[in-house]
Image: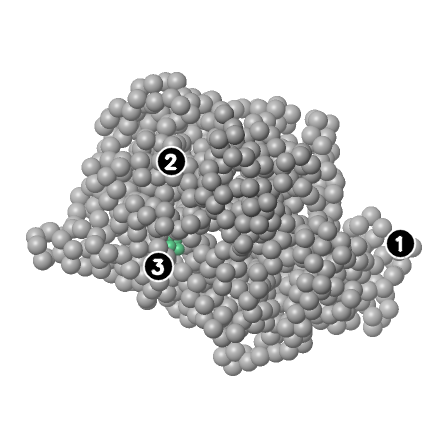
């Protein structure tokens, strides 16, 4: 039986004048998931506006959001299942697509999946795009139920996630960080654009950031490029690409060792700063309880941290415990920072020592250490400064330390999740007032360190698992700090799998919307990986460069045609931080499927049923959505995705708030409490300014990896952050003068939106969207002309072609590429041939990933050559 019933999507009669409605739903042109109202007239969506009722977007949409109509009605949208007739796969092979029926497509997919599941379910790779965040539950549940640990997100995950999410999780119990725009007076951004371009809670944050600037918030943007955030900032500080840690550590040193400004009571009560560290770099522990010891200033003795009042814990001094000399972690940090003089940091980052000293002084002074403020009747710590980082700072080989060094600025002055400070967005929710559901609060884990209350990554950020010989293709069982992994597609994947005795190889891929040929690294590496799969089925809206490697392509419904009980997962993913409202919007169809399009979540349910693991999929949904009786899905029952959405909504918000209620209202919301937003004083957890757990993890990884020929550089596993150079910093080839990097373009979402004609038009009018930004002075020195066609060549000989665009707003050594352009698929004719494909310059192997969190290094040392000089 085919469980998909197109009648469910039947619209009201479309007689002229009878159908004129605004359908509340959610945008999915990027993972910001802003709430929308789709205006449908006589069966046609004629306009999309922001939903002012929602906290997600607050009635605003970006240019992509309002252009969604053009993606939906694009005549190049897929409408029928397709099967390739050319069995040879390659970048330049024509798949020879042939239209087939759903029964035939599903029959073939079922046969393949049955076989591989019976053989070894781990041979299935489930891959998805990060753009449609709500897809996470159906795809993850499918993978879990099938029995494969090989679940991957495409470039979005590997480029922006591993460091930012890891450190935000460990230090703020959150997926990412933002300034508390309502109260912050001084924000410093390192390679981030929160509130000024794309990203989490994008449109809500744009409003909040604008209001903050009007209020007088000073904003300093540290970035090689003066673009969306820097252009609106009080000050732009251009730095050498990938050197954020050097600048941040220089500032930390000035604050602690030159100015002597830090928040002692915060460090005592909320971090592991007082924990005693022995000569082995590890905690000195109580012999009985095994708890880390602190030095009790009142009794003048070492005691477990649990037994001493925070105010009595020593932060500095040399102590002897059972004959072992030891120092508080803060003492170690303070000593460690001394080597990062502003003069040293200037040499690395190119930011002058005087500027570093000034920024450190401004940040430390503006923090107003010791002050409090009353918010809605609650007296709270007030630290109106925030240092935030995101993709630009963390997308490097030194990903972990780059981000950690920036966040240390916050923790040194106590500016973490209190009023005005750096906020994790929404890590503490006390639940809906009627049901208490969607409640999560961070808790104290091993050694009193914080464990997040809610998480969406591959594993919780703390406490890391024990490294072991990997059973998964991404090797995260071994590299336990990493979340998403490059090893599914890297050029050395076979070598790595052999080294680590991975006992199987990938054979089948279920892909949801990811264009990984473009979104990870160079096309040859990823193509070589995809060619090896015996079978790929891909849910797509268009035939893109990756769907051309598929055996069967299934035409998906887009966001204007599908249900989801949440606009993303978890619901806080794109909810703005700070005071305001909790808000849970849904996604619902404003339009029916066109042709034979079907929503992927329903197709996955049908495939599971046909293959024979429908009951497992129901169980996986129960676990993923935390469904409790009477809303738990029954093992033997066939459900539609709409029914599952209904179950989740009733489970969370009561039987009166099922899908029918949400279809009408679009969202449910309730007020945030100050104790939820500014949760740090109310939750008894500590965070590590000294990552004691890191070196033992590194040692265990080395014990497994090094006998197998994989050297683990110990400097990446030290408890205190350092500046460690990228490959690009080590390149001294003559003529390779520039650091290539890419940045998010506000009018495009990764490689996805170039096919949209309105966005393409805007991008063509923008001087930078489809060009290569170069410092005007440096370009003229080399006799380049503005607009000149050039080749950009990496030190490994990879080349991309584009046109230069001169600007004063880029670091002299930087070469900036917008978005992820340069499509070549005939299935995306509007996008084809536009812009520059920066990722094609990136190497994809162990040498170019962080040895700590296996994050891909995204900067490349390049030379620029006139196009006519290269044959
Ligand atoms: S920010 Fe993203 S989710 Fe919001 S309107 Fe723009 S594209 Fe849509």
- Respond yes or no on whether mark 3 lies under 8 Å from ligand 1: yes
Q: CA distance from mark 1 to mark 3?
A: 60 Å
Q: Residue 797: percent from the left, percent from the top?
A: 57, 29
Residue at figure coordinates x 48%, y 31% from the top left: 868
Quadrant for residue 855, please give it: top right
Q: Quadrant of ligand 1?
A: bottom left
> Callout 2: helix, strand or loop?
loop
Q: Residue 668: percent from the left, percent from the top?
A: 34, 64
First in sequence: mark 3 or mark 2? Answer: 3
First in sequence: mark 1 or mark 3? Answer: 3
Residue at figure coordinates x 70%, y 58% from the top left: 352
Is the residue marked by circle 3 packed among few (<14), some (14-19), or many (20+) residues within 10 Å? many
> Callout 3: helix, strand or loop?
loop
- Respond yes or no on whether mark 2 lies under 8 Å from ligand 1: no
Q: What residue does disc 2 label?
A: 833
- Front label number (3 vs 2): 2
Q: What residue does disc 1 label?
A: 324
Left or right position of 44 against 688: left
Q: What residue does disc 3 label?
A: 61
648 vs 831, nearest the viewer: 831
Q: Is residue 719 above or below residue 575?
A: above
């Amino acid at each position: 039986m085919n469980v998909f019933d197109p009648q469910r999507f039947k619209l009201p009669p479309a007689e002229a004048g009878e159908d004129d409605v605004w359908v509340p739903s959610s945008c999915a042109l990027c993972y910001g998931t802003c709430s929308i109202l789709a205006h449908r007239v006589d069966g046609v969506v004629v306009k999309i506006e922001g939903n002012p009722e929602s906290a997600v977007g607050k009635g605003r949409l970006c240019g992509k959001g309002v252009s969604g109509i053009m993606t939906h009605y694009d005549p190049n949208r897929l409408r029928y299942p397709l099967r390739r007739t050319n069995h040879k796969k390659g970048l330049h092979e024509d798949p020879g697509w042939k239209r087939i029926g759903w029964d035939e497509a599903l029959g073939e997919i079922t046969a393949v999946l049955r076989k591989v599941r019976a053989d070894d379910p781990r041979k299935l790779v489930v891959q998805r795009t990060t753009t449609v965040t709500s897809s996470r539950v159906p795809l993850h549940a499918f993978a879990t139920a099938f029995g494969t640990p090989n679940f991957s997100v495409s470039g979005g995950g590997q480029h922006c996630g591993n460091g930012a999410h890891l450190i935000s999780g460990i230090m703020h119990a959150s997926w990412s960080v933002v300034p508390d725009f309502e109260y912050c007076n001084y924000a410093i951004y390192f390679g981030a654009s929160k509130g000024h371009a794309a990203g989490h809670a994008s449109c809500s944050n744009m409003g909040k950031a604008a209001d903050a600037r009007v209020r007088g918030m000073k904003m300093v943007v540290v970035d090689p490029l003066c673009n969306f955030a820097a252009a609106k900032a009080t000050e732009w500080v251009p730095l050498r690409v990938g050197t954020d840690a050097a600048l941040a550590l220089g500032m930390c040193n000035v604050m602690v060792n030159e100015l002597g400004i830090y928040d002692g009571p915060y460090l005592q009560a909320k971090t592991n700063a007082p924990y005693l560290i022995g000569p082995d770099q590890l905690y000195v522990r109580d012999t009985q309880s095994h708890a880390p010891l602190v030095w009790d200033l009142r009794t003048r003795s070492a005691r477990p941290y649990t037994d001493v009042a925070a105010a009595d814990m020593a932060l500095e001094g040399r102590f002897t415990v059972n004959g072992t000399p030891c120092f508080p972690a803060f003492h170690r940090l303070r000593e460690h920072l001394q080597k990062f003089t502003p003069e040293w940091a200037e040499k690395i980052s190119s930011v002058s020592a005087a500027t570093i000293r000034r920024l450190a002084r401004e940040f430390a002074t503006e923090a107003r250490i010791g002050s409090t403020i009353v918010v809605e009747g609650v007296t709270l710590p007030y630290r109106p400064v925030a240092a935030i980082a995101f993709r630009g700072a963390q997308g490097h080989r030194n990903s972990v330390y780059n981000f950690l060094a920036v966040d240390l600025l916050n923790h040194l002055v106590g500016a973490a999740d209190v009023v005005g400070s750096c906020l994790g967005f929404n890590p503490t929710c006390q639940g809906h007032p009627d049901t208490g559901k969607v409640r999560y609060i961070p808790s104290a884990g091993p050694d009193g360190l914080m464990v997040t209350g809610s998480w969406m990554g591959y594993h919780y950020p703390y406490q890391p698992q024990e490294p072991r010989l990997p059973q998964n293709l991404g090797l995260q069982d071994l590299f336990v700090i990493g979340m998403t992994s490059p090893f599914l597609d890297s050029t050395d994947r076979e070598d790595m799998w052999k080294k680590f005795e991975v006992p199987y190889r990938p054979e089948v891929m279920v892909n949801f919307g990811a264009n990984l040929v473009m979104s990870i690294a160079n096309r040859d590496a990823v193509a070589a990986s995809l060619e090896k799969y015996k079978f790929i089925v891909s849910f797509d809206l268009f035939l893109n460069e990756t769907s051309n490697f598929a055996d069967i392509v299934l035409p998906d419904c887009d966001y204007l045609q599908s249900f989801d009980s949440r606009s993303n997962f978890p619901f806080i993913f794109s909810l703005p931080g700070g005071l305001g409202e909790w808000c849970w919007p849904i996604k619902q169809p404003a339009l029916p499927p066109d042709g034979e399009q079907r929503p992927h979540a329903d197709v996955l349910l049908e495939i599971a049923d046909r293959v024979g693991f429908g009951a497992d999929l129901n169980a996986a949904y129960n676990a993923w959505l935390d469904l409790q009786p009477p809303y738990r899905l029954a093992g033997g029952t066939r459900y539609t995705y709409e029914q599952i959405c209904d179950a989740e909504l009733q489970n969370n918000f009561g039987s009166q708030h099922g899908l029918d209620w949400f279809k009408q209202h679009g969202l449910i919301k309730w007020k945030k409490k100050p104790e939820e937003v500014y949760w740090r004083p109310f939750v008894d957890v500590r965070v590590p300014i000294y990552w004691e757990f890191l070196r033992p993890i590194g040692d265990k990884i080395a014990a497994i990896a090094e006998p197998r020929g994989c050297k683990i550089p110990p400097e990446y596993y030290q408890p205190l952050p350092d500046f460690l150079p990228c490959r690009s910093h080590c390149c001294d080839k003559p003529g390779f003068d520039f650091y290539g990097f890419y940045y998010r373009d506000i009018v495009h979402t990764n490689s996805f939106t170039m096919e949209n004609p309105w966005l393409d038009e805007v991008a063509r009018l923008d001087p930078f969207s489809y060009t290569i930004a170069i410092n005007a002075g440096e370009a003229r020195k080399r006799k380049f002309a503005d607009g000149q066609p050039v080749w950009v060549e990496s030190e490994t000989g990879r080349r991309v072609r584009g046109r230069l665009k001169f600007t004063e707003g880029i670091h002299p050594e930087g070469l900036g590429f917008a978005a992820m352009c340069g499509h070549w698929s005939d299935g995306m004719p509007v996008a084809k041939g536009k812009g520059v494909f920066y990722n094609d310059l990136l190497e994809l192997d162990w040498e170019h990933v962080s040895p700590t969190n296996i994050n891909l290094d995204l900067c490349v040392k390049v030379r620029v050559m006139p196009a006519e000089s290269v044959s």
